[in-house]
Image: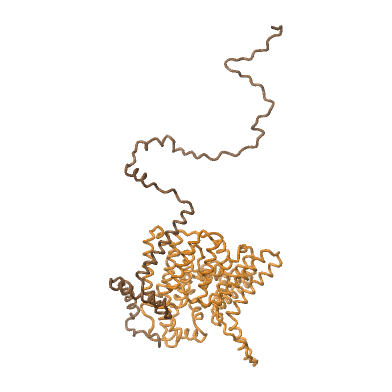
Chain colours: A brown, B orange
Amino acid sequence: MTDERDPPEIPLEPFPVHQPESPFPPLYESLPPGPEDPPSDWIQTADAHDLAGDHSTERENRLAALSRFAFPSDLPLDDDGVAARDRRWTTRTVVVISAFLLVFNAVSPLNWSRQQAPGWLQGTVQQMSEVWVAQLAVFGVDMPRQGVREAWMAAQDARFVGQEPVSTTP
Amino acid sequence: MLFPTLAFGIFFLFVYFTAWSLDRENGRRKLFLLLASWFFYAQWDWRFVGLLIASAVLNWAVGALIARQPGAKKAWLVGLGVAVNLLILGFFKYYGFFIEQAGDLLMRFGWERDLPLLQIVLPVGISFFTFQGISYVVDVHRGKTPPAKSLLDVMLLMSFFTHLVAGPIVRASDLLPQFDRTPRLTRAVATYGLLLIVWGLFKKTVIASELSVNLVDPVFFDPSAYGAVDIAAAVYGYAVQIYCDFSAYSDMAIGLAALLGYSFPRNFDQPYRASSLQSFWRRWHISLSSWLRDYLYVPLGGGRKGLVASCINVFITMLLGGLWHGAAWTFLAWGALHGGVQVIERLGRAAFGDRKVVPTVIGVLVTFHIVCLGWILFRAESFGLAVAMLEGLGRVGPVTVLTPLLLTLIVGGMAMHWLPPRAIEGVAERLKTAPSLTLGLLVGAAFLLIEAVRPDGVAPFIYFQF
């Protein structure tokens, strides 16, 4: 016990309201202004609650679900993957064109072989081409080509009314 | 080895598969393409592969030196590089012509001398690869393109077989950046390339060959034997033939390069739609006309020094452009015609401003006929034959060589200028989504159709001689 008087009582009810002043300036004034927040990507019309909304009541077709489970779709391709896929597609196209011409245009290697000097390669190509051309003729596969050629030659021979047959060596 | 032949088809298939199998090793891929290009060029004359290599080494060395030297020496180096390129071109292409002219001149003055005439074989495509070399050296000097990272790049730039013998003149700034990375191939580009090859094959082997063999060659050989209709048909036929021949080569070159993953600039843009000669040269052999503009017309002063100077400059440019096509007075006259008409157009624009004095239809017709007049000089082997062709236009006579088919080809060749400007790109955009089997069968059927109607054998492309 002392004779001194008690200091004025800090009111405690309901909570302390007195806050001693800080000797330091407020922190935010000493810092440079920070970057602004990016624009919000909040979509007013979208709501997380939507996710559990109507879709939850729809049931996926069981067959579709089974197929999705059995044959999961690939992950999206990166640039290299896209390039490789396009290259494979091009290569398949080139192979189809080459095979198609090899089968249906055997006259071309035959003509080529006839223009070359005699030799093993020339002879081999000529014999194979002749056999192949003959086989195509048996099945009538050469008919479209032959038909187009004959039509073209008929067009070449056509003349204007009253015109004499062409002579390129006057 | 011509593009529309079986041998080239097999060669290209081998190059295509090997090049793409090396897609993860760009350096080896480029080396393989270079060796393939030399093999391709050696099919004409293997000795000139050495010339090609020497020319590439020269330009690479000059480009590297220019990049390392201070300002004043650069000008000397670029001058040296250009001079050596022109010396190579001049020796192989113009030596005989100038010696012959000098001999004639001396004889007129009574100083007849036996000048050293040499039988010089003209290397195929020399005009194209020397122009590429010049553009590389000058572009490095101007800072438009950095010097190539390796000799291999310059060699491939100048030797790449798709553009080696008849263009288009692909500049270093277009191609060198593409050599830095392994090329990518997309469906759109591949489809576009395939369609360009088919279209080019059709134009060359069907239209150009048919017109050449059955109409143009016989009439230009002896114009006095034909009447006005045949001669006019031969002149129009040659206009269509040279377009279908040269643009076909460019189309196939662009298409083949596209299949290997490289992009070349467009070289033709429906030239007979032009309503002035200035416009014509923005549509015809674009890679040459832009080359002449950037490396000849602009250094001469271009249009910076007034109207008279610009007229003189454009005339000189076209005159030398004519000489580039061949060492003959007829080519010079062809260049002078194009230069002279462009001078008149410039004077007209200076007098009337941008006002449209002549309707577009009239402009297109007049321009086309001036171009046809030029083609007579271009095709005729002498001035005498050119004059005989012009005289024959006034001669009445029976129609002997013109047939309904040839007339259809002439009309068709002209009509293709009025197709939508980017028709092939549009078709490629639609076809790129097709399965490979469908597209392969379609393209294969188109090839078969062309093979069925084309004449036996293939004449060399007209621009090979330049």
Give how far across and how far down residue A78 sits, in percent: 48, 51
Q: Return the residue found at the far bottom.
A: B110
Instruction: Judge whether residue B286 can be spotted in this image.
Output: no
- The quarter of the picture where residue B402 lies is bottom left
Instruction: Judge whether residue B73 can be spotted in this image.
Output: yes
Give how far across and how far down residue B233 sits, in percent: 42, 80
- The quarter of the picture where residue A162 lies is bottom left
Q: Residue at x 36, y 84 (%)?
A: A166
- The quarter of the picture where residue B312 lies is bottom right
Q: Return the residue found at the far front.
A: A120
Work out whether residue A107 or residue B133 is closer to the camera in this orientation and state it: A107
Work out whether residue A138 or residue A47 is closer to the camera in this orientation and state it: A138
Work out whether residue B397 or residue B407 is closer to the camera in this orientation and state it: B407
Q: Residue at x 47, y 71 (%)?
A: B247
In the displayed structure, does residue B147 sit left or right of residue B222? right
In the displayed structure, does residue B301 sit left or right of residue A38? right
In the displayed structure, does residue B141 sit left or right of residue B460? right
Q: Residue at x 60, y 15 (%)?
A: A12
Q: Is residue B108 above or below residue B31?
A: below
Give how far across and how far down residue A115 sits, in percent: 41, 79
In the displayed structure, does residue B26 sit left or right of residue A162? right
